Image (cartoon, rainbow, N blue to C red):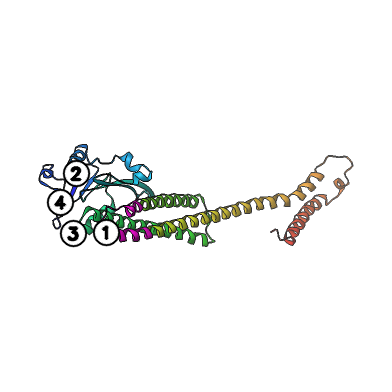
């Protein structure tokens, strides 16, 4: 799918007839957005803009030169946007190329970032004089969404913390799995934000962007630094919760082991008494006692009481 944003006020063409490219000039176009484009669509855009679009493999490469690079007539930017999918984050690669003042973006799926950026563009066309400004607006929108995601994770961590403060609830396997999921999400989101930091650092070093953009990029880098610090704090907080919950699980297990240990020790003296009186020897004076059986039972109960009293004295119970 191809979406063309023209510089004329509120002019957007979706799924255009390919013949339109024969009528358009670079000065007429602000942004060409490709969403899961067909091979034919890619070739038409490449031919019109005289560029080579990035493959998915190129967009996913982690080298700094792959994140931001400059050619003779174009600027190439690759980054990854974190997408929430079934309570876990996936990273979707996105590619940008700015050539002749026109932005060309390519992605596989619909992304909220582009929807928001498109809405802002159509609300205030005059604020976007070139594709460079559209690119920076998209990245600004993405940073705002990253901040929302960091805040969502913080709220989920706060929910776990409140569970930790509730002494009436027991810790189970699901809690630890939830912590592991949040840790994974935090790491993925942090890597995505850090990837944006590398891209913006490349833009800040460049001399090919309009002068009014650099101050915005500086502010974005400061915001990203704050988000990375917040993500690091969230990860440390999750590690603390994980250690706390593991400690609580160990305490619960120790209580169970302690209970069985106490029971086994309590019944050791009665077992000894029963073993003695269960021996089959001829010279056994207690066999002639009228109250020998009640005497042995009482002796067992007395040994249990003495053991319990000893434990209580030592404050083991």
Closest to the camera, between mark 2 and mark 1, is: 1
Magenta segment main secondary structure = helix
- Residue 125 is tagged as 3
Kindly report the distance in space between the C-alpha atoms of the residues bearing marks 4 and 2: 12 Å
Give the CA distance from mark 1 to mark 4. 20 Å
- Circle 3 crowding by C-alpha within 10 Å: few under 14, some 14–19, many from 20: some
137 vs 278: above or below: below
Per the image, is 213 magenta? Answer: yes
Query: Residue 165 vs residue 38: left or right?
Result: right
Mark 4 or mark 2: whose residue is earlier in sequence: 4
Q: Which residue is mark 4?
A: 27
Other-residue count near label 2 (Cα within 10 Å), few / some / many at <14 / 14–19 / ≥20: many
Q: In the rendered structure, does residue 202 fall within the stretch colored magenta? A: yes
**Closer to the observer: label 4 or label 3?**
4
Label 1 secondary element: helix
For discs 2 and 3, the disc positioned in front in the rendered view: 2
Measuring 34% from the left and 57% from the top, which residue is drawn there?
143
Chain-order first, disc 4 or disc 3: 4
SS at circle 3: helix
Q: Say which quarter of the image contains residue 40.
A: top left
Residue at which label 2 appears: 49
Residue 62 falls in image quadrant = top left
Q: CA distance from mark 1 to mark 3?
A: 19 Å
Look at the image and give the residue range highlighted in magenta. Answer: 199-223
Secondary element at image label 2: helix
What residue would you read off at disc 1? Answer: 211
| First-in-chain label (2 vs 1) | 2
| Place of residue 129 in the rendered image (x, y in percent of width and height, measured from the top left) | 19, 57
Q: Nearer the viewer, residue 210 or 160?
A: 210
Depth check: 306 or 151 in front?
151
Which of the two labelled residues, at mark 2 and mark 3, occupies the earlier sequence position? 2
């Amino acid at each position: 799918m191809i979406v063309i944003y023209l510089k004329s006020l509120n002019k957007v063409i979706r799924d255009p007839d390919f013949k339109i490219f024969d009528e358009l000039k670079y000065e007429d176009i602000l942004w060409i957005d490709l969403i899961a484009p067909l091979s034919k669509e890619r070739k038409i855009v490449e031919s019109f803009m005289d560029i080579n679009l990035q493959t998915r493999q190129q967009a996913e490469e982690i080298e700094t030169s792959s994140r931001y690079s400059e050619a003779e007539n174009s600027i190439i930017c690759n980054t990854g946007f974190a997408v929430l999918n079934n309570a876990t984050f996936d990273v979707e690669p996105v590619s940008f190329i700015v050539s002749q003042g026109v932005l060309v973006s390519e992605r596989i799926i619909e992304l909220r970032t582009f929807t928001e950026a498109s809405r802002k563009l159509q609300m205030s066309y005059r604020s976007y004089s070139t594709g460079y400004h559209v690119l920076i607006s998209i990245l600004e929108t993405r940073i705002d969404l990253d901040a929302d995601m960091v805040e969502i994770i913080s709220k989920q961590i706060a929910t776990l913390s409140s569970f930790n403060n509730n002494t009436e609830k027991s810790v189970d396997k699901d809690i630890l799995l939830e912590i592991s999921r949040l840790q994974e999400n935090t790491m993925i989101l942090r890597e995505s934000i850090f990837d944006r930091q590398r891209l913006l650092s490349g833009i800040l070093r460049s001399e090919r962007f309009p002068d009014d953009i650099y101050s915005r990029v500086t502010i974005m880098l400061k915001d990203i630094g704050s988000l990375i610090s917040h993500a690091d704090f969230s990860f440390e907080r999750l590690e603390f919760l994980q250690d706390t919950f593991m400690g609580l699980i160990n305490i619960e297990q120790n209580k169970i082991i302690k209970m069985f240990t106490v029971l086994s020790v309590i019944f050791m003296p009665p077992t000894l008494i029963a073993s003695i009186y269960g021996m089959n020897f001829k010279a056994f004076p207690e066999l002639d006692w009228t109250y020998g059986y009640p005497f042995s039972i009482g002796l067992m109960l007395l040994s249990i009481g003495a053991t319990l009293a000893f434990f209580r004295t030592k404050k083991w119970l």
